[in-house]
Amino acid sequence: MLLSPSRMVTYVVAFTLLVVFLLHLRPTALRQPANVEVYKLPQNTVQDQSVFKWSQRKEHYPVGQYYRLPKSSLARLPRVQYDFGKENATSVATRRQRRAQIKAAMKRSWEAYRQRAWLMDELAPVSGMNKTTYGGWAATLVDSLDTLWIMDMKPQFEEAVNAIVQIDFTSTTMETINLFETTIRYMGGFIAAYDLSDDRRLLEKALELADMIYAAFDTPNRMPILRWDFHAAARGEKQVSPDHIILAEIGSLCMEFTRLSQITNDDKWYDAVVRITNLFDEQQGLSQLPGMWPLSVNGEQADFHTGDTFSLAAFSDSMYEYLPKMYALLGGSEQYARMYRWAMSTATQYMLYSPMLKKENHNILLPGTVHVEDGGYTLQPELQHLVCFVGGMLAVGGRLLENETHVDLGRRVTDGCTFAYSHFQTGVMPENCNLIPCQGLSKDGCAFDTPTWHQAILKDAFLTEDRGKNATTLIKQLRLPSGVSSIRDRKYHLRPEAIESVFVLYRITGDASLQEVGWKMFRSIHSRTRTAFAFAAMEDVTNSTMPLMDNMESFWTAETLKYFYLLYSDPDVISLDEWVFNTEAHPFRRPGHDARTSRWSSWWK
C-alpha cells in the first residue's frame, strides 16, 4: 500500500526524533571524533552469563558531561632510556645466565601457585595452602599475566588467559573491597597483558572489571569509596565518599583508567579520575607543606589539604609516582608536569636526608617523613622499603622534564636503598628502620660518631620495653647495624621497590655496576626466602634462623621477579621510551608506540 505524502512526512519526522533521542542517551560516543569508534563489551562476552551486571546498575549521581581525554602532543618527549651500544660476548653470556636463573624462580613460583592455589588470590608458600585476600578473583593469576608474557612463558600465559573467564566480578565473599589494590593489580594486569598480547579477551575482562569499580564513584561529588561495600552498591544503595581516605589510594587510579580510555576511545573512564586530579591540582598549595598533600584526605568534603604529616612512603607513595608517569602516558601533560615539579621541589628540600654513616656511604640520600606543627617542620629519619621507588621516580621525571639534578638525586636514593640491603645481616633490608640524619639536614654526608649513634638508640628505645638498657646491650640484643638506631619492622615481604629503582636507573644511565648490585640482591633474596614450594616473606631480616612467614603476595611474581628479569634483558624489551609502568609493574604502551611500530614487537612473535 502506498503512503500518502502527509503520512510519509509524519514517519520521517518521527524517525528523526527517535534517532536524536537515542543519540542523546549515548553522550560518550557523541563526544568522540566522527571517525573514532568507542569500544564497548560485545553482547556475547562471559559477562552476559551473570544475572547481575555492573554495567546495568542505575547510578544515583550520574555525570552530566564527561571531561574529554586530551589528545597526545605530537611533540616528541625527551628520550628516557640510555643509548646502549654493542655488548661484548662475555657480558651477554653473564646477563643471559642470570636471567635464566630469575626465570627459573618465576617458573617455580608459578607452578606452585598453579598446583596448589589455582584461581585463588595467593599461594601460602610454607604450608602449601591458599588464601583469599583481594576479592577472591585470582589475584596472583591476573597480576602475573604480563610477567608470563615478558618471560616468554607462552603456554602458561595461554592457560591463564583461558582461565580468566571463570573470574566473576559480580560476586565476592569479602565484606569490603580495596578499590586501590583491585585497580592496580587486576585492572592494571588485564590492561598490560592486553597491550602486550592484543588478546581481546583481556580487554573485555578489563571493561567488565571497570564497570564494577566505576560503581564506587557513584557518590554526590564523584569522589570514590576506596574501602568499598561491594554488596551495598550491588543492592543499589546510595553511597558517600568517606572523610578519611589514604592519599595513595585515591591518588593512584589515574593511570589505569586513563589507559582504558585511550584503548577504548571512551572518555568515561578518564573523566572518573581527572576529577580527582583536578582537586589535587587546585589544593596543592593549600597544605601545611605547600606542594605536597597529607597522608590522609577527606573524600566526602573533597578536602585534600588538611593534615600535618607528609611523606613519599607508605600511604602516599604512588600518588607522587604517578605524576611523571601520567605526563608520559598522556604524551606530555602540562598539568602533571607542573604538579610533579612542585611536589618534588618540596620533597627534595624537606624530606631527603644524608644519614650518618661511614665515609664510603657519604653520597647516599634517604627520604624521611615530615611532621608539621605550629609552622615548624620535624623530620622523622626513617627508611621504609616502600619508599625505595623514589629513586626510579626521580630519574624518570628528571629525564622526561629535562632535569638532570633529579636523575642524580634518584641515583643517590637508589644507592641508599641498595646500601640498606648490604648493611643488614641477611643481605635484605627490613620494612622500616630509623637512621640518624647528618646535623643541619646536610645532604653531603657527615662523619660517623659512635656517641651520637648510641644516644639515638637510647632515644628510640625510651618508649619501648627496652627502656633503661644501655646502648651496647641494645645493639647486641636488637642486632642493630652501625648507624641504625632502631628497626621498627623487621619483615621483608618480597617487595619490589628497591630492585625497581635499580632497574630504572640502569636503563636510564647504562651503568653496568647496577647489574652487579642487583645480582647480589637477587642471590640474597633467593637464598633467604626459598621454601619447599616457592618463596616466602621473611619474619626478621636480622635473624636467618627465624621461620619464614606463610605469605607470598602477588607482587612477587608481578613486580619483584619481573624487575629482576628486565634488569638482565635486552634494553629493547619494555623500553622506557615506549612503555610506562603502573605501580604494580604493569607496563602500559605510551602514545605512538603500538605493536606495529615497536622494535621489540617482533621479539615475541
Image: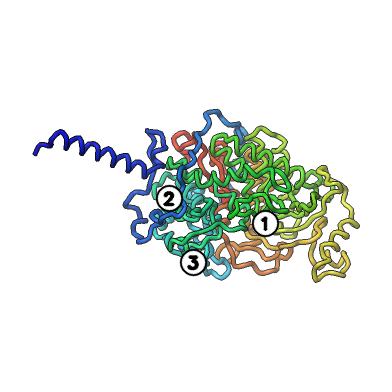
Could you tell me if residue 420 is visible in this image?
A: yes
- From the viewer's side, name the closer residue of 511 and 61: 61
Q: Who is closer to the viewer here, 601 or 204?
A: 204
Three-letter amino acid code of the residue under disc 3: Arg
Q: Nearer the viewer, mark 2 or mark 3?
A: 2
Q: Position of residue 497 (x, y in %)?
A: 64, 51
Q: Quadrant of residue 407?
A: top right
* Mark linked to residue 207: 2
Please identify, in this view, whether the residue under mark 1 or under mark 3 is nearer the observer. 3
**Residues under numbered marks 2 and 3 in contact, where contact means CB atoms less than 8 Å apart:** no
Label 1 or label 2, whichever comes before in sequence order:
2
Q: Report the front residue among 223 and 151.
A: 223
- The correct choice, above or below, for 465 with respect to 112 in the image is below
The numbered mark, 2 or 3, whose residue comes first in the sequence reads: 3
- In the rendering, which numbered label is found on residue 221? none
Residue with the mark numbered 3: 116
Taking the spot 29% from the left edge, 40% from the top edge, the residue there is: 19
Dots 1, 3 in contact, CB < 8 A? no
Q: Three-letter amino acid code at disc 1?
A: Ser
- Please state which amino acid type lies under the numbered disc 2: Leu
Q: Residues within 10 Å of mark 2 (few under 14, many from 20)?
A: many
**What residue is disc 1 on?**
524
